[in-house]
């Protein structure tokens, strides 16, 4: 499964006021009412979580970096007190935070662990901030999973950061890894490159579990984060290495580039229990039952292998023939790879069905999704896999194919913000599915889908790479993903 990260234009540091410590004292109590802002003797503002005032566990105190606060501070319910300060000048001591806990009658008898982010020598300021926050977040995640002994292992953490680079490498986008700038082909290749580097530097013993913490830098979508988790899980599962995966989001106030950061730390199995590896990690993370799970009995709908084979073949052949046109459209409004992605996906489908039994379409479709997850790239590849995974399940229970399509569309809409009118492939899919469900007429559904694609010529893009272009640039050009899907549906309906 590939991942495509759209470059964004984040708010500026002055707009967000990240570097104003007092901003957190105003905002965080609103986000979590149990948090109380307290001023200590040196004038620093610290945040105290009163919900832990009667905790019987070891308390955790955290000193983060101004302008680089992460989601971990808010998501970890075991952090009793925390503050942020400039990386260049340490002003808050561990003793200061412990004194605050004492003064407010927190039970410190069981012990207090103070986690502090400090600047890493030898790194540029941007990467330094992310590396510091990544290690900080990883430590907080470990403290939530194991006992206090874990602070002895934080020095064993190895980490790397990869961000999308503004220049292209070859025909595609590039990624700036820790050691090199390389062409981005898929999430699997890019993430495996990082993980292989990390494993080389931190080999685990037979009695250890790999703690892996990954952070999306400057905001990846839920779908992209799920794919990152999938690829990391698959990497360790294929190597038969026990692992425990945690996650956070980091806003790097000194760089607009989006990307990911990964850190690993070998932990004795006596302290950390490995997570089970799901049979189909992508399906697991997006909320679809495992595509390979066997089903007993037969579906309510009966399928003819010759008929289904003809429909799929014609649809895929039509997409392959339309690739130059799709590529031309995407060169104008995107990064030019939509045509290649859909063409390669269609070729993969044709190859897969050569020896498949299409009379058992639900189970065969599940197996096809497993194949496409690995071999079909792009954001469109992820959306197709989510839709087809759901369709494979719904074909067991639905009374009609149109009903199964409608259920699958409803499921897909839970995992994308795109809706009708947003200039995406859904401007084709939604009218097709809804008309087919209402009328049962495939040609009428295709006609409405074509109208939907036509409207994208006049729509302003709200999502995806086209949303960064002036509306005049996209006027008169259909959305490439919507047009490509229309070609697939056109071939299938004509074949029927």
Image (spheres, rainbow, N blue to C red):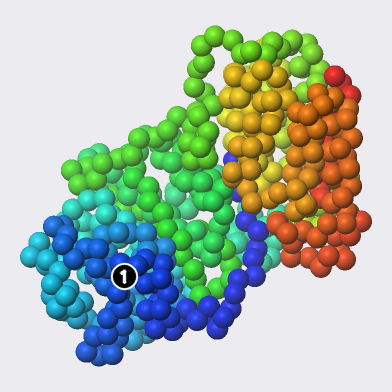
Closer to the camera in the image, 314 or 429: 429
The residue that disc 1 covers is 35
Residue drawn 43% across and 81% down? 23
* Picture layout, residue 274 above or below residue 31: above
Give the residue furthest to the right. Answer: 476
Q: Is residue 26 left or right of residue 48?
A: right
Q: Position of residue 7 (x, y in %)?
A: 65, 63
Closer to the camera in the image, 220 or 135: 220
* Picture layout, residue 131 above or below residue 1: below
Q: Is residue 100 left or right of residue 485?
A: left
User: Quadrant location of residue 2?
Assistant: top right
Give the residue furthest to the bottom. Answer: 42
Q: Can residue 224 be seen in this view?
A: yes
User: Quadrant location of residue 363?
Assistant: top right
Q: Position of residue 403 (x, y in %)?
A: 69, 25
Q: Where is residue 433 in the image (x, y as percent from the top left)?
A: 76, 33
Residue drawn 37% across and 72% down? 29
In the rendered image, which quarter contains the C terminus?
Answer: top right
Residue drawn 87% across and 50% down? 455
* Picture layout, residue 169 above or below residue 432: below
Residue drawn 16% across and 75% down? 104
State the SS at label 1: strand
Q: Can residue 356 be seen in this view?
A: no
Q: How many marks?
A: 1
User: Quadrant location of residue 434?
Assistant: top right
Q: Where is residue 337 in the image (x, y as percent from the top left)?
A: 75, 49
């Amino acid at each position: 499964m590939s991942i495509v990260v759209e470059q964004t234009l984040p708010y500026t540091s002055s707009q967000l006021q990240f570097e104003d410590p007092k901003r957190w004292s105003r905002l965080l109590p609103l986000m979590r009412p149990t948090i109380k802002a307290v001023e200590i003797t040196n004038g620093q503002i610290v945040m105290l979580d009163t919900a832990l005032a009667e905790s019987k566990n070891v308390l955790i105190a955290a000193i983060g970096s101004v302008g680089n606060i992460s989601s971990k501070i808010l998501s970890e319910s075991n952090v009793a007190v925390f503050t942020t300060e400039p990386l260049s000048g340490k002003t808050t001591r561990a003793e200061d935070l412990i004194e605050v806990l004492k003064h407010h009658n927190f039970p410190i008898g069981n012990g207090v662990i103070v986690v502090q982010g400090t600047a890493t020598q030898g790194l540029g300021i941007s990467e330094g901030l992310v590396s510091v926050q990544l290690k900080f977040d990883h430590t907080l995640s470990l403290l939530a999973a194991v006992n206090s002994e874990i602070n002895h292992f934080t020095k064993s953490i190895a980490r790397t950061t990869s961000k999308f680079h503004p220049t292209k490498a070859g025909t595609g986008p590039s990624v700036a890894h820790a050691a090199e700038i390389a062409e981005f082909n898929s999430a699997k290749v890019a993430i495996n490159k990082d993980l292989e580097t990390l494993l080389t530097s931190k080999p685990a013993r037979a009695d250890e579990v790999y703690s892996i913490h990954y952070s999306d830098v400057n905001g990846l979508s839920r779908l992209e984060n799920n794919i990152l988790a999938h690829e990391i899980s698959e990497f360790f599962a294929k190597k038969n290495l026990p692992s425990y995966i945690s996650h956070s989001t980091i806003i790097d106030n000194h760089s607009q580039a989006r990307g990911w950061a990964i850190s690993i730390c070998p932990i004795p199995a006596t302290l950390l229990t490995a997570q089970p590896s799901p049979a189909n990690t992508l399906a697991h993370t997006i909320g679809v039952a495992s595509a390979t799970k066997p089903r007993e009995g037969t579906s309510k709908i009966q399928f003819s292998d010759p008929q289904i084979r003809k429909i799929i073949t014609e649809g895929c052949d039509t997409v392959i023939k339309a690739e130059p046109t799709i590529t031309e459209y995407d060169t104008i409004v995107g990064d030019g790879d939509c045509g290649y992605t859909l063409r390669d996906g269609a070729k993969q489908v044709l190859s897969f069905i050569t020896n498949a039994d299409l009379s058992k379409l639900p189970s065969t479709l599940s197996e096809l999704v497993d194949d496409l997850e690995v071999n079909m790239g792009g954001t469109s590849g992820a959306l197709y896999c989510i839709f087809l995974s759901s369709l494979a399940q719904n074909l067991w229970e639905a009374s009609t194919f149109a009903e199964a399509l409608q259920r699958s569309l409803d499921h897909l809409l839970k995992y994308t913000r795109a809706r009708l009118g947003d200039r995406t492939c859904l401007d084709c899919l939604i009218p097709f599915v809804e008309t087919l469900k209402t009328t049962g007429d495939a040609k009428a559904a295709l006609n409405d889908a074509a109208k939907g694609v036509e409207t994208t010529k006049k729509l302003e893009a709200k999502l995806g790479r086209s949303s960064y272009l002036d509306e005049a640039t996209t006027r008169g050009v259909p959305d490439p993903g919507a047009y490509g899907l229309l070609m697939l549906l056109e071939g299938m309906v004509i074949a029927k």
